[in-house]
């Protein structure tokens, strides 16, 4: 896991110097950049995302945010917490509104079984409490993106820590 974090951090630092990081929308990016991002997420992060406009927006969003620091109550790239991160992802990638905290977000989902998870579904956790205290956004292959104390990162639902505190999954209903 530490090796993956180092590789991700190195790639994030190197992207601008390689001329691959540009502030263009996914549809305006060179094909090589989109292929690089897809390959990066498939091989390095261990997730498989299809190539469609929503996935390309998600690729861009992940590349833009991965490695950014965690800050409780934070809502910017200087520091962001889990629910603000999920809210930002939903707003920027899917064009949908999410409430500000994870307990409120849970009220707007239809619960689904883990086996039914699709890209963009929310995964909720109760970490050492009776209430929902953490949220992430499902990607694929049992991986989800989140903002935790180690910053914005991709984690696995198969990890013993996340298995222990996993509560429920949900799909956003129309708001």
Image (cartoon, rainbow, N blue to C red):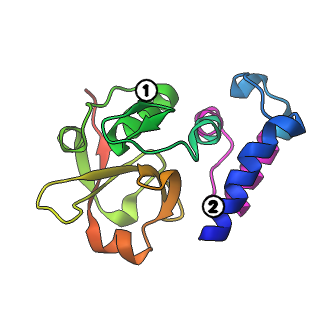
Residue 5 has which mark?
Answer: 2
Point out residue 14 in the picture as x, y percentages from the top left corner: 81, 44
Q: Residue 135 in the image: x percent, y percent?
A: 33, 50
At 45% across and 24% down in the image, what residue appears?
95
Residue at the extreme left: 130
Horizontally, residue 157 falls left or right of residue 8, namely left
Q: Residue at x 47, y 30 (%)?
A: 94
Q: Which residue is mark 1?
A: 91
Kind of element beneath mark 2 = helix
Q: Is residue 91 above or below residue 71?
A: above
| Residue 45 in sight in this render | no
- Left/right of residue 131 with respect to residue 160 in the rendered view: left
Residue 124 pos. (x, y %): 28, 55
Numbered mark located on residue 158 in the image: none
The region drawn magenta spans 34-58
Q: Nearer the viewer, residue 18 or 28?
A: 18
Q: Nearer the viewer, mark 2 or mark 1?
A: 2
Compare marks 2 and 1 and give the one earlier in the sequence. 2
Crowd band around label 2 with a 10 angstrom C-alpha radius: few (<14), some (14–19), many (20+): some
**Is residue 36 inside the magenta stretch?**
yes
Q: Is residue 93 magenta?
A: no
User: Where in the figure is residue 174, as x and y percent of width and height?
Assistant: 28, 30
Count numbered badges in the picture: 2
Left or right of 29: which side holds 116? left
Can residue 173 be seen in the rendering of this structure? yes
Q: Quadrant of the N terminus?
A: bottom right
Q: Quadrant of the C terminus?
A: top left
Disc 2 from disc 1: Cα separation? 26 Å
């Amino acid at each position: 896991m530490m090796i993956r974090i180092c590789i991700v951090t190195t790639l994030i630092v190197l992207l601008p110097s390689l001329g691959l990081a540009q502030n263009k929308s996914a549809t305006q990016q060179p094909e090589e950049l989109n292929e690089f991002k897809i390959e990066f997420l498939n091989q390095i992060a261990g997730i498989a995302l299809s190539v469609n406009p929503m996935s390309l927006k998600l690729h861009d969003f992940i590349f833009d945010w991965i490695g950014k620091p965690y800050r409780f109550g934070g809502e910017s790239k200087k520091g962001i917490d889990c629910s603000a991160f999920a809210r930002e992802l939903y707003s920027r990638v899917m064009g949908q509104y999410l409430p500000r905290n994870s307990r409120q977000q849970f009220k707007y989902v239809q619960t689904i079984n883990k086996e039914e998870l699709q890209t963009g579904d929310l995964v909720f956790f109760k970490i050492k409490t009776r209430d929902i205290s953490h949220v992430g956004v499902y990607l694929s292959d049992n991986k989800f993106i989140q903002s935790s104390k180690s910053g914005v990162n991709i984690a696995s639902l198969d990890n013993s820590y996340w298995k222990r505190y996993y509560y429920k999954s949900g799909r956003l209903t129309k708001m």
